[in-house]
Image (tube, rainbow, N blue to C red):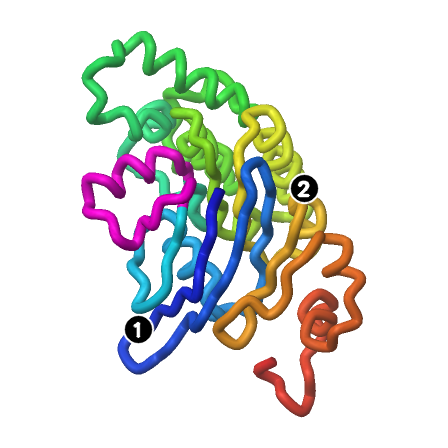
Amino acid sequence: MIEVRQLTKRFGPQTVLEGVDLRIERGESVVIIGRSGCGKSVLLKHLIGLLQPDAGSVYVDGQDITRMDERSLLQVRRKFGMLFQNAALFDSLSVAENVAFAFRNQRNLTRAEIARRVAEALELVDLPGIEHKRPAELSGGMRKRVGLARAIVYRPEILLYDEPTSGLDPIVADSIDQLIIRIRDQLRVTSVVVTHDMRSARRVGHRVAMLHDKRIYAAGPTEEIFASTDPVLRRFIDGVSDPKHPDF
């Protein structure tokens, strides 16, 4: 469903990604791991066309989105929903208004239809009946769930998650993991999850890809990656630094 070919991205003199290759099949759940600042979120933003590469291509359903104009790109983006790291809710809007934000330019939907879809999305993330609350009244875990409700309200084919369990205690993080799995299976979506949380990565991913040294260092079925004896993979998975090379 998604294919990244030889993707390179620079910001000024700094090369963040160089020759990245990645395939994601329809209905698959792929977890992207790697150290802070290695380019995971940058790669995620390329998948939805929020960033343009300096070289290489990104294909979505066989279409190279790096060569599209903005109007064509908007059509492709409708296949995607995204949960941002901090949920990215608008504090001045109610929960219902936040979730319904995707419908703001759709004149063909009645208020009743929008309200029904919002209620369904909140039900799917286990937050029924909170439409009138404000983001400031919600816990961190609830904010993440509202962000996910907004991402799924128009039933996308692909869901992107940027650090979905960051800043959450282990119990709430576990509930978010279970929700990611349930949404994936119930809505039959393709999922791409960026995370530092190894417990979460092992639970939600069919496959794991590790970004290291500006490219995909290793990729494979989740259990194979977690059983690997490769020293770079093992240090990251086990959370152990290399005293000779503390930055690796």
**Mark 2, mark 1: which one is toward the viewer?**
1
Question: Is 63 included in the stretch rendered in magenta?
Answer: yes
List the residue tagged with mark 1. Answer: 11
Q: Position of residue 192 (x, y in %)?
A: 53, 47
Type of amino acid under label 2: Asp
Residue 116's place in the image compared with 179, above or below, is above
Residue 196 covered by magenta stretch:
no
User: In the depicted view, which residue is nearer to us: 18 or 107?
Assistant: 18
Q: Answer with left or right where residue 122 lies relative to residue 226.
A: left
| Residue drawn 49% across the image and 42% down it | 1
- Viewer-closest of 174 and 156: 156
**Residue 167 can be seen, yes or no:** no
- Tell me the crowding category of disc 1: few under 14, some 14 to 19, or many 20 or more residues within 10 angstroms, Cα based: few
Query: At 29% across and 59% down in the image, what residue appears?
Result: 52
Q: Is residue 84 visible?
A: yes
**Bounds of the magenta segment:** 60-81
Q: Quadrant of residue 18?
A: bottom left
Quick one: which residue is furthest to the front in this view?
62
Categorize mark 2 by other alpha carbons within 10 Å: few (<14), some (14-19), many (20+). some
The one of 55 and 211 positioned closer to us in this rendering? 55
For residue 154, side relative to residue 222 (left or right) = left
Image location of residue 49, percent across then percent down: 32, 50
Q: Earlier in the sequence, mark 2 or mark 1?
A: 1
Check the image and report above or below for 86 versus 114: below
Q: Quadrant of the C terminus?
A: bottom right
SS label for mark 1: strand
The residue wearing badge 2 is 174
- Looking at the image, residue 171 sits to the left or right of residue 77; the answer is right
